[in-house]
Amino acid sequence: MTLMKLNNRPATIGIHDLFDSFFNDADRVFGRPSQRWLPAANVVETNDAYHLELSVPGRDKSKFVLKAEKDTLVVSYQNEQTNQSGQENEGVKVLRREFQNNSFQRSFHIGELVDASRIQARYEDGLLKIWLPKRAEANPSVHQISVN
């Protein structure tokens, strides 16, 4: 049996993505955590809203900051890392840390279609769920068109 490494990178990759990938892989090889962690996101559209979910388990919901600026939604999380590998704190020495609770900032283009004054968010079961209601004029009415 031959095992192959799966490569989920897109077929077209920009030069910036290539360098980011190289340096992020180097960090993992040398045991340093990548500083550019971003949570995975799901975006779903319904008739009246967009629903955005970010996978961010184990976070303190009071440290999330959401801002709607112009046509962009910015979601960030601020956390100071404590007790990195090899550091000792109150008699406890972390020997290995494989998952992080890093700070992050992620932006989403929401355009003119979203009513920013009605955006709502909640954090449950490790998911940050954001409801982005569409503006009334963004909901086109459906008209039946007959073909003659």
Image: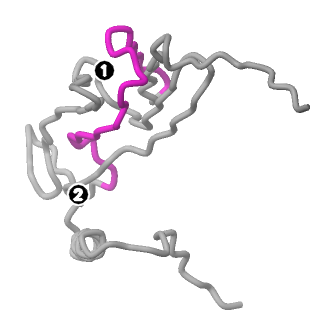
Amino acid at pointer 2: Leu
Inter-mark Cα distance, 2 to 1: 28 Å
119 lies left or right of 47: left
Along the line of sight, which residue is nearer the eye, 15 or 8?
15
Residue 122, position in %: x, y?
41, 16
Quadrant of the drawing holding the C terminus: top right
| Residue at horizontal 29 percent and vertical 75 percent from the top | 18
Q: Quadrant of residue 72?
A: top left
Residue at label 1?
61
Q: Is residue 42 above or below residue 2?
A: above
| Residue at horizontal 27 percent and vertical 58 percent from the top | 96
Residue 32, position in %: x, y?
19, 65
Amino acid at pointer 1: Lys
Outermost residue toward the right in this view: 148
Mark 2 or mark 1, earlier in chain: 1
Give the residues drawn in magenta, as a range: 98-125
| Residue at horizontal 65 percent and vertical 16 percent from the top | 141
Q: The residue tagged with tag 1: helix, strand or loop?
A: helix
